[in-house]
Image (cartoon, rainbow, N blue to C red):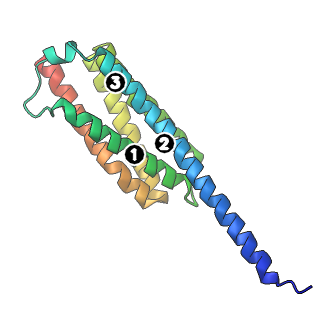
């Protein structure tokens, strides 16, 4: 029997690569489910309680049309998923950052509930301040470990800052 020892290593490497690919796919699906669950809860709150209350508010001239929010948020949630997933598969990842990511999703969802369900604009503004603070912490923590994760979160931070300006203007105008 002539067994080539290299065959074992090739087989082992192939099996390990297959396992890692499955691990990456499963972890992406898991992070996407968790991240988009925040989106679903926020969307339900928005759809069920937005009207007629929101239409009756005085809005600033730079308020975007309603149709823009769904594609923007869908894109941002995808970028957030990619950011945390990339971080998760980095060599120097730490679980505290992942926990902060999950906590920030709670505040992300809370804003929609406070704003659209309870119509509490000032409380929603406070929630946005906390959310933006958590996103900023995530940016710094991602930057130390994975620059792709860092860059993927910047549009989200900017959009939330824009949301803060809109929220503040709604308070001032109403």
Number of other residues with Cα within 10 Å of mark 2, as a class: few under 14, some 14 to 19, many 20 or more: some
Closer mark to the observer between disc 3 and disc 2: 2
**Quadrant in the picture for residue 50:** top left
Which residue is at 75% across, 70% downward? 12
Q: Position of residue 125 (x, y in %)?
A: 28, 25
Instruction: Give the Cα distance between marks 3 and 2.
Output: 19 Å
Is mark 3 in CB contact (under 8 Å) with mark 2?
A: no
Number of other residues with Cα within 10 Å of mark 3, as a class: few under 14, some 14 to 19, many 20 or more: many
Instruction: Write down the residue under mark 2.
Output: 32
Position of residue 3 relative to residue 25, above or below, is below
Say which of 67 and 84 sits in front: 67
Say which of 13 and 59 sits in front: 13
Is mark 2 in CB contact (under 8 Å) with mark 1?
A: yes
Number of other residues with Cα within 10 Å of mark 1, as a class: few under 14, some 14 to 19, many 20 or more: some
Say which of 100 and 37 sits in front: 37
Instruction: Write down the residue under mark 3.
Output: 112
Instruction: Write down the residue under mark 1.
Output: 78
Label 2 residue SS: helix
**Quadrant in the picture for residue 96:** top right
Which residue is at 45% across, 46% downward? 81
Label 1 residue SS: helix
Which residue is at 27% across, 14% downward? 119
Image quadrant containing the C terminus: top left
Q: Where is residue 132 in the image (x, y as percent from the top left)?
A: 34, 37
């Amino acid at each position: 029997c002539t067994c080539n020892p290299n065959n074992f290593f090739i087989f082992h490497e192939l099996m390990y690569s297959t396992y890692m690919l499955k691990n990456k796919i499963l972890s992406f699906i898991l992070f996407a489910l968790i991240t988009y669950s925040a989106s679903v809860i926020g969307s339900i709150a928005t759809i069920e309680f937005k009207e007629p209350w929101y239409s009756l508010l005085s809005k600033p001239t730079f308020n975007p049309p309603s149709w823009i929010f769904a594609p923007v948020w869908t894109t941002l949630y995808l970028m957030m998923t990619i950011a945390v997933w990339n971080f998760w598969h980095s060599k120097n990842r730490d679980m505290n950052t992942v926990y902060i990511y999950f906590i920030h999703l709670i505040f992300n969802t809370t804003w929609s509930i406070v704003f659209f369900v309870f119509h509490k604009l000032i409380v929603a503004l406070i929630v946005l301040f906390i959310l933006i603070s958590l996103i900023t912490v995530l940016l710094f923590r991602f930057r130390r470990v994975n620059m792709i994760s860092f860059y993927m979160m910047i549009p989200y931070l900017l959009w939330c800052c824009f949301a803060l300006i809109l929220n503040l203007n709604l308070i001032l105008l109403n």
